[in-house]
Image (cartoon, rainbow, N blue to C red):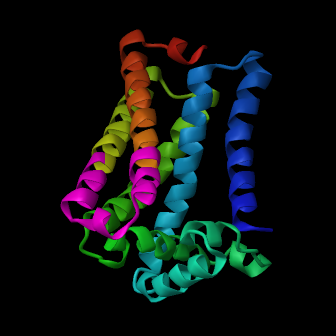
């Protein structure tokens, strides 16, 4: 199975379970719930990668040239080469293999080979700080079991961090001059499209969290 297929399956299972459970109990879908569920499911996956980044932080830099070369051989980007890699059973559960996502990304932004950089430390922080709260929101957004005020407070803390951290990382990419070593198309995809989408979803989640506190119910999510 190629990497892209496994990742897609993971997100479909996690997000699909939450969305499907809500539909089975409420008999309806809600647009805000679907968007935030997908966003939170992605962050669960990202947190797992960020654990791998921490555990194999000295290994990341040793594989950057490998993935740069793989991309050149394929006549494509390093990220495309990685996503089309076929996985063995052992690799699916390999911390070392998944840490190579950051080797691939380091072809675009070498910050992840520098343990003192903003990008590296922001990701480590996100991986360890947001995993459990993300899972809590994922579950309570599907089947409210936490008081809306408490959920709103958790949400504000999480979504604010994602907004702040992503803006900080994006700024460091340009202030640090890393944009000079990549094509305009790669900078557009990895910084503006991916990070821009992350910020927009976090802003949406921040708004929903405020409404949960003010309204004292889950009406904003269609309950």
Whether residue 155 sits left or right of residue 21 in the image: it is left
Q: Is residue 177 one of those drawn in magenta? A: yes
What span is colored magenta in the figure? 167-193
Q: Which x, y percent locates residue 140?
A: 57, 31
Give the residue at x 59% y 45%.
41
| Magenta-drawn stretch, dominant element (helix, strand or loop) | helix
Give the residue at x 42% y 60%.
128
Q: Is residue 190 one of those drawn in magenta? A: yes
Whether residue 219 sits left or right of residue 75 in the image: it is left
Measured along the vertical axis of the image, is residue 221 above or below residue 7? above
Give the residue at x 73% y 16%.
28
Q: Which x, y percent locates residue 176?
A: 21, 65
Whether residue 120 sits left or right of residue 132 in the image: it is left
**In this figure, what is the number of numbered marks?**
0
Give the residue at x 78% y 79%.
88
Is residue 140 at all visible to an observer of this figure?
A: no
Is residue 182 at all visible to an observer of this figure?
A: yes
Q: From the viewer's side, name the closer residue of 165 and 158.
A: 165
Q: Quadrant of residue 135?
A: top right
Q: Quadrant of residue 184?
A: bottom left
Q: Quadrant of the C terminus?
A: top right
Q: Which x, y percent locates residue 200?
A: 42, 34
Measured along the vertical axis of the image, is residue 203 above or below residue 131? above
Q: From the viewer's side, name the closer residue of 94 and 183.
A: 183
Q: Quadrant of the N terminus?
A: bottom right
Q: Which x, y percent locates residue 24?
A: 79, 24
């Amino acid at each position: 199975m190629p990497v892209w297929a496994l990742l897609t399956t993971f997100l479909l299972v996690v997000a699909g379970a939450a969305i499907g459970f809500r539909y089975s109990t409420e008999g309806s879908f809600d647009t805000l719930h679907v968007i935030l569920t997908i966003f939170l499911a992605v962050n669960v996956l990202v947190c797992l990668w960020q654990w791998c980044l921490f555990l194999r932080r000295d290994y990341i830099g040793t594989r950057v040239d490998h993935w740069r070369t793989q991309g050149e051989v394929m006549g494509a980007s390093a990220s495309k080469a990685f996503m089309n890699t076929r996985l063995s059973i052992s690799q699916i559960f390999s911390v070392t293999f998944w840490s190579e996502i950051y080797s691939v990304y380091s072809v675009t932004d070498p910050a992840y080979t520098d343990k003192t950089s903003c990008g590296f430390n922001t990701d480590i922080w996100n991986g360890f700080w947001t995993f459990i709260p993300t899972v809590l929101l994922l579950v309570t957004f599907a089947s409210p079991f936490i008081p809306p005020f408490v959920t709103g407070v958790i949400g504000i803390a999480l979504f604010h961090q994602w907004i702040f951290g992503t803006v900080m990382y994006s700024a460091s990419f340009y202030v640090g001059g890393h944009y000079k070593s990549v094509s305009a198309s790669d900078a557009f995809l990895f910084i503006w499209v991916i990070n821009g989408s992350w910020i927009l979803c976090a802003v949406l989640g921040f708004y929903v969290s405020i409404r949960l506190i003010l309204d004292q119910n889950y009406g904003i999510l269609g309950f």
